[in-house]
Amino acid sequence: MNPQELYKQKLISIPEAVSKLQSHQTLGVAMAASEPPGLLSELGKHRDHLEDIRVWVCLPLGTYDFVLDPSMDGHFFVENWFYGAADRAVHSQGRESYIPNNLHEAATKKLYAAKERVNVFFGSATPPDSRGYMSLSLGLVLEKQLIRAADIVILEINENLPWTLGDTQIHISEVDYVVENHVPVAELPVVPPTAAEEKIGGYIASLIEDGSTLQLGIGGIPNAITAFMMERKDLGIHTEMFTDGMVDLYNAGVITNRRKTLWNGKMVGAFALGTKKLYDFVHNNLGVEFQQGAVTNDPYVIGKNYRMISINTALQVDVLGQVCSQSIGSRHFSGTGGQLDTHRGAQLSENGRGIIALRSTAKNGEISTITPLLSTGAEVTIPSQDVDTIVTEYGIADLKGLCLRDRAKALINIAHPDFRAQLQEEVERLGIVPHL
């Protein structure tokens, strides 16, 4: 049977597709800009026919009834690898819970715990080409692993998705059903950096040499770095997330990937999340390759890159060097994602560096983000023995190899000046460092 006929046979309506899910089953969902909005919007409408559905998600972008509506209790329980704003709101209601993970092994561990069983997978893809191949487009972190483990695979076809290259291809014969929903692709607006973030960006850029390979995280601080690197030469990209700032650096001739150790000449990542500018850039771009998160975020793969620089952000750092990037005290906020993966991988690299950036204060300057100890209940994202370089708008603390006394001094020196005396006093009072 030719691919076009096979596609027509597998094409069903969105309500019919959701009806394939049965009570007490597990549903795996593609992440971020790859999530299928039509299928997920329909899911809550089937509440009365579904009980005890486990839904696995990661960095969801849409707002859906099956998550937000309290009447869904008992019908859907969400397990999430990385929280967004809606998830933080629902967490306190007991209908959603975080899955602790490192990105490169997130799907593997979850599938092992579930005896490698996903009953249904919902994802998205481009329309098929003449041979029946589709592109999974903007996400490859978990998607292929979940697809291979699923009993039923349903893809939402959207002609607005870019066709991306690498390990993204899937054939119509590998899919059980398709639905069509040609809607705009979810975007993440570029956040203009604050004055503090611009200072942080300048400090970080000073640590990046020509020929380095970069991993950039999400938010204002990574965006701020871009403006300070326009004079760099032959930078490369090995990242989990493609961002708009990378497009700017590529168009300026800063990113060439010529000196990369792995995938020489190509930008490599696991997913893309940004604006239409980014999506247009990755479309059919031979210089951009998507690989599974199990590959891009394996620390030992990352470590093979020469002069690998990992840049991520944090919420809080204590004077021991412990980094918290995922919770505010005991209140879960986001997730580990690939932060520890890329941080460790960069330090395995020859001349590599793992950088953690944060603003020196929070709550409009009311509290210091550098503290004697992490807040009660805070989740440790990077343990003290892994910490390398911490940057705030007040400078750079290079902590590798330092004893606790010298770490405390270095970190207090980059804390906000209003809190430095108080930090020193508290560190001495607690006996962390008796005499600073």
Image: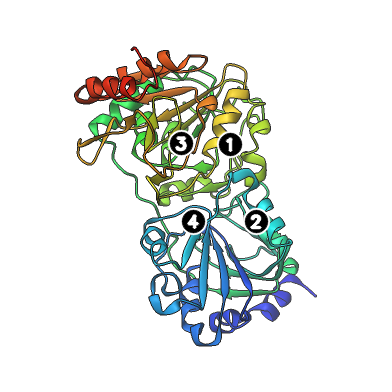
Q: Are marks 4 and 1 in contact (CB under 8 Å)?
A: no
Q: Give the spatial CA distance, label 2 vs label 3.
A: 31 Å
Q: Give the spatial CA distance, label 4 vs label 3.
A: 18 Å
Residue at 35% of width from left, 28% of height from top? 372
Q: Are marks 1 and 2 in contact (CB under 8 Å)?
A: no
Q: Are marks 4 and 2 in contact (CB under 8 Å)?
A: no
Horizontal and vertical percent for residue 404?
A: 45, 17
Q: Which amino acid does the dot numbered 1 rest on?
A: Asp
Q: Are marks 4 and 3 in contact (CB under 8 Å)?
A: no
Q: Which residue is mark 4?
A: 32
Q: Which of the pair 218/10 is nearer the observer?
A: 218
Q: Nearer the viewer, mark 4 or mark 1?
A: 1
Q: Nearer the viewer, mark 1 or mark 3?
A: 1
Q: Which residue is mark 3?
A: 246
Q: Secondary structure at mark 3?
A: helix
Q: Nearer the viewer, mark 2 or mark 3?
A: 2
